[in-house]
Amino acid sequence: MTSNQDWIRRSEQVFIKTYNRFPATMVKGKGCKLWDADDNEYLDFLSGIAVCSLGHSHPAVTDAICQQASSLNHVSNLFHTQKQIELAELLIKNSFADRVFMANSGAEANEAAIKLARIHGGENRYEIISLTGSFHGRTLATVAATGQPQLHKGFEPLPTGFIHAEFGDTKTLEKLITKNTCAILCEPLQGESGVRPLESEYLKSIRQLCDKHGLLLIFDEVQTGMGRTGTLFAYEQLPVVPDIMTVAKALGNGLPIGAMLTTDEIASSFTIGSHASTFGGNPVAAAAAVATLKTMLSNNFLDSVQKTGLYFTEKLNEIAAQFPHIATGVRGNGLLLGLILTDKGIEHGADIVNRLFQKGALINFAGGKVLRFIPPLIVTHQEIDALITVLSEALTELSD
Ligand SMILES: *Cc1c(COP(=O)(O)O)cnc(C)c1O
């Protein structure tokens, strides 16, 4: 029996079955490549779900982690720590925000945003409107905010105060606003449910509704943030600025860390004891995040993400033109891209992902709608060409 299979057999004995994993036990990563326990090599266009944006084992991040781990791993937020301060300063210097709260994950960053919006709203203003198709996390409050009924099923009663507005429809959104509403929460580009961008005009009218009714606009940039769309945050390319923003996924390039960012005025609604986290902004995770941010902010890194994204988009459009019965086009921004599938393509979505896996390329089928490509942001044209070759092979096999 191969060692890959040995590990999988052991894994299947011990875990609660919440994940539908690929049959691979990953042991090593470098750049855009991963290796499993049998030394099979994979071209990674998933990056641990938009997390390892500088690629696996980036030397600057590895050095930062090792250095920090050899001096101080954890003291709790009862104390100030250096890397956490540096990280907050960098986030503030490069965003609309004045203040930061550190968390460990996307869901926790969103929990912090939800609590802040409620306490800022004041008495009886607790309702948060989010959009259908959204994804905000798996804790009870963030799953309630998530506009996907299949993720709620069986967990009711969910926390109250989460209302979902039909994606793209401003009129019904306004009708859902009541005296109890405190915020509108959305991703500037929906990732999990199929790489769906929100149009500029739509976002502008959401911002206007917030201003008209005194609501906070919360952007969940957990997936779109940290350079994924070719600017540090996706809102920088949009005609609106949020009041609160959450980030996580790529913040620590693989170490678990999240953050909630906001203005001085809104931040002042939290006072000492309002909110806390034992691990939030942990020194090692914060050190990784500082190294990640510094790398992303240097040497035209973000410009090259945009250029690479355009190249990849062009190649995916060629695939759509070559296989019109499977794919109709591309959507997304930067290196958060989805190949839009026809009804027939959707039927084969999971199969296409598996065929690519067999050929050593990792992608996923997001929202049961699109093939999602979220490679490390350092991906080269050659690596994109290699992925396109494998994708084309897999789609040709389907057509036979
Ligand atoms: C992944 C994701 C989350 C949840 O992040 P976790 O770290 O898994 O809790 C929240 N919002 C968006 C937009 C995401 O993509």
Image (cartoon, rainbow, N blue to C red):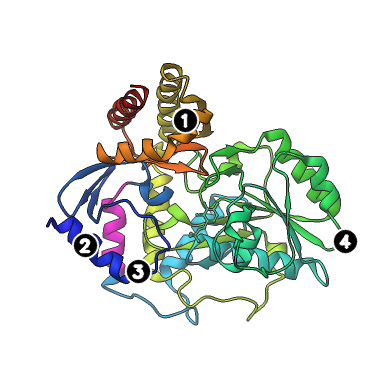
Front tag of 4 and 1: 1
User: In this rendering, which labeled residue sits more in front, label 4 or label 3?
Assistant: 3
- Secondary structure at numbered mark 3: loop
Please say whether residue 48 is visible from this viewpoint. Answer: yes
Which amino acid lies under the numbered mark 3 shown in the image of this protein?
Answer: Phe
Q: Is residue 60 magenta?
A: yes
Where does the N terminus fall, quadrant-wise?
bottom left
Left or right: where does residue 169 sit relative to residue 342?
right
Sequence-first disc among 1 and 2: 2
- Furthest residue toward right: 179
**Foreground: 296 or 376?**
376
- Residue hosting label 3: 15
CB within 8 Å, label 1 to label 3: no
Residue annotated with mark 2: 7
Quadrant assignment for the C terminus: top left
Amino acid tagged 2:
Trp
**Counting residues from the N terminus, which is met first, the one under dot 1 or under dot 3?**
3
Please tell me whether residue 116 is drawn above or below residue 184 in the rendered image.
Answer: below
Q: Quick one: label 3 or label 2, which is nearer the N terminus?
A: 2
The outermost residue toward the top is 322
- Residue drawn at x 49%, y 34% as measured from the top left: 346
Residue under pointer 4:
179
Which residue is disc 1 drawn over?
345
Gap between marks 4 and 2, in whole Å? 55 Å
Residue that appears at 24% across and 50% down: 29
Task: From the viewer's side, name the closer residue of 264 and 335.
Answer: 335
